[in-house]
Image: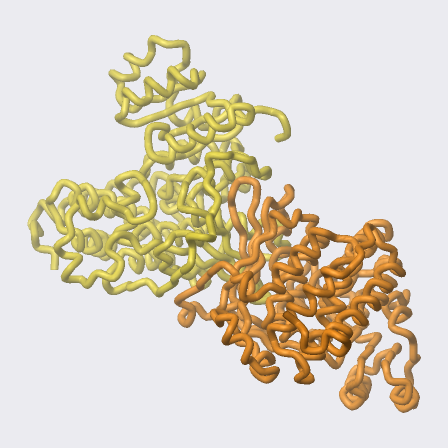
Chain colours: A yellow, B orange
Amino acid sequence: MGNTVKQLAVLGSTGSIGQQTLEVVRALPHKFHIIGLAAGGNTDLLAKQINEFKPRFVYHQNRESQAHLANAEYELLPLEEIASHPQVDAVVIATSGKTGLSPTLAAVKAGKKICLANKEPLVMAGEIITSEARLNAAQILPIDSEHSAIWQCLEGETQPATRLILTASGGPFRGYSPTQLDEVTAKQALKHPSWQMGTKVTIDSATLMNKGLEVIEAYWLFDMPFENIKVLIHPQSIVHSMVEFIDGSIKAQLSYPDMRLPIQYALSYPERLPNPQLPRLNWDNISNLTFEQPDLDTFPCLRLAIEAGMKGGTYPAVLCAADEVAIDLFLSGRIKFADIAKVVEQTLEQHQVTGHPTLEEIMTADAWAREKALQLITGDNLCGLP
Amino acid sequence: MGNTVKQLAVLGSTGSIGQQTLEVVRALPHKFHIIGLAAGGNTDLLAKQINEFKPRFVYHQNRESQAHLANAEYELLPLEEIASHPQVDAVVIATSGKTGLSPTLAAVKAGKKICLANKEPLVMAGEIITSEARLNAAQILPIDSEHSAIWQCLEGETQPATRLILTASGGPFRGYSPTQLDEVTAKQALKHPSWQMGTKVTIDSATLMNKGLEVIEAYWLFDMPFENIKVLIHPQSIVHSMVEFIDGSIKAQLSYPDMRLPIQYALSYPERLPNPQLPRLNWDNISNLTFEQPDLDTFPCLRLAIEAGMKGGTYPAVLCAADEVAIDLFLSGRIKFADIAKVVEQTLEQHQVTGHPTLEEIMTADAWAREKALQLITGDNLCGLP
């Protein structure tokens, strides 16, 4: 650290976390330099980012765009090569869904510092990724606000925590009855009350699937049994999570809901850096922090995720795949909001699990689950969800 | 640390913090051993404690009791000698008012580990105590729940904090108007809504003087400018204090209001120890944490203390002395609750400050302030408080 400039690769640079990562880099140019950028469909924005940050390595998912972008002075590389390149000090995995799995694995094998925002890599392949990280002395630094909060609270503690308390805003439909939930539209589900996020994670927040994925992530990141990971609804999204210690003392981390803080913490760790753009909590305006238990009956995705995590093996990969398919179907108006949980549940029920799966077995389970989830809707079972 | 048993001296063992310290020791006999006990007027309880813990060193403020207690097998020593004895690993300063000043100074000069519950030593002589502590590598470990919270939140952070947020329950008269306050009795003032404490600190909590003393303590303990120490009323007494860092991130420490936790943390530091007697927060029953600004007009003692702290020199010692006298007068029914602040304010107004005072100058200021405060009530100014 000290005065050296960190060379960062940002995978998923045009997404919400990717753009906010670049905002942090813009605010702290003497600390961070962008050496790699990778993006999905948003070619225009990627072109602008390339123009501004002049990275040495670029990836774009669209082959034509690759060719189009290839005019400038950088090297076009696959995601995995950027993530593991010797010149990269830290890689920000800000991709969505399973896209981040393969580059995350490449980065841990290369012993990199990995700032991880994409949940699916750890959820789908937590055992492989964490054991490869140990083997190669790779550091996985969480960017999720909840895991960043836990990580900050654990800093300096010499003994393991006894309990993790993950907070959840409860999403836009907190307090809804199952009947009310049946009527909600994609537009409503995409309006999150406290966080600005990408499409998939916003829907996952509305179903509480997001919190379930975070529980599985926490299990892998902090080596904490599922029984000792508690989810607590906290609508103000000020307390980002809490950690309980062996003497009963609890530490919490607080801030306004602004992803730039956990992003910056992961980038600057073990330092904290001053950044005038990061807001300070104004206690003149904070009078009430509320907490309630999650409603697992109305929001079954949270329960499904925790169960899949506890069962382990290929179940979490199936959970992720079925969820991705179900969200696409919901956003395109083909299933109702409540059907997301049903698609996931039925796909999990029909899955033949493989314990301690290889990456190939995880990919096979993923492909099977996508097909199965689609079949549940489009095949014989069209509209036949119970 | 490890498996060695810590030899503890507890000064003020029959008071509230003293008794709770012995409870912690009872719960963890393989970790702590009582080598010294010292108490004020409560001879019966001290005799029981001696019988149970069989300390090697004893002090009792009453000479006759000293003789009475002298039958058993221990050495009668002055407070200062117990606090600085080579066989003592850590000394718990759980005395009240200015009693703790001299033994605290003896302990820092002997380079001891000092678990400090008594506020006045640092408030009255913070400059001397902290510079002697640095000189002799003594460790001052705070037992106040607020300072323990801040200390826990700072643990593992590599950079200084930017702001401390001390929480306060607000005491039994939170929300009272000045007129309502005029009518309150000693009995009402002694009923604290969330903490079980000694008499003096309970009245100090009702006037918010206690929080003012804590602000001055925090200034010395954490080297934080007064401008960056904020007081926030939090009636539930669950969040014990918070620390803000350079990136805007805030850490908070939470638990039920139970002094055994900060006591144990100071005793066991840098370890945390399991103790089934310490309660765990039950989030099924915590739905609301509220925060509000303190009312400095109705509770002027908080303002007076912070002002005295900022002005420095002998002012804080005068503040403490006048406050002790005023509380005695209030408890004996000679002045009204609101007069406590008036006695303190008028004493401070008439004080000729000495900057960077020696211990002797502090004691002179203390004696002057006690006399002046009494004069304000009993002399020409009898009942003449504005």
Image-quadrant location for residue B7 = bottom right
- Image point (41%, 60%), residue name: A288
Relative horizontal placement of residue B352, taking residue A246 as reference (left or right) = right
Relative horizontal placement of residue A210, taking residue B145 as reference (left or right) = left
Q: Is residue A79 above or below residue B42?
A: above
Q: Residue B281 in the image: state x and y as whole percent.
A: 49, 69
**Relative to the observer, which residue lies in front, A353 or A9?**
A9
Q: Residue A225 in the image: state x and y as whole percent.
A: 46, 59
**Relative to the observer, which residue lies in front, A25 or B299?**
B299
Relative horizontal placement of residue B246, taking residue A129 as reference (left or right) = right
- Image point (91%, 85%), residue name: B63
Q: How many marks?
A: 0
**Relative to the observer, which residue lies in front, B31 or A81?**
B31
- Image point (38%, 63%), residue name: A291
Residue situated furthest front in the rendering: B380
Q: Residue A25 in the image: state x and y as whole percent.
A: 47, 27
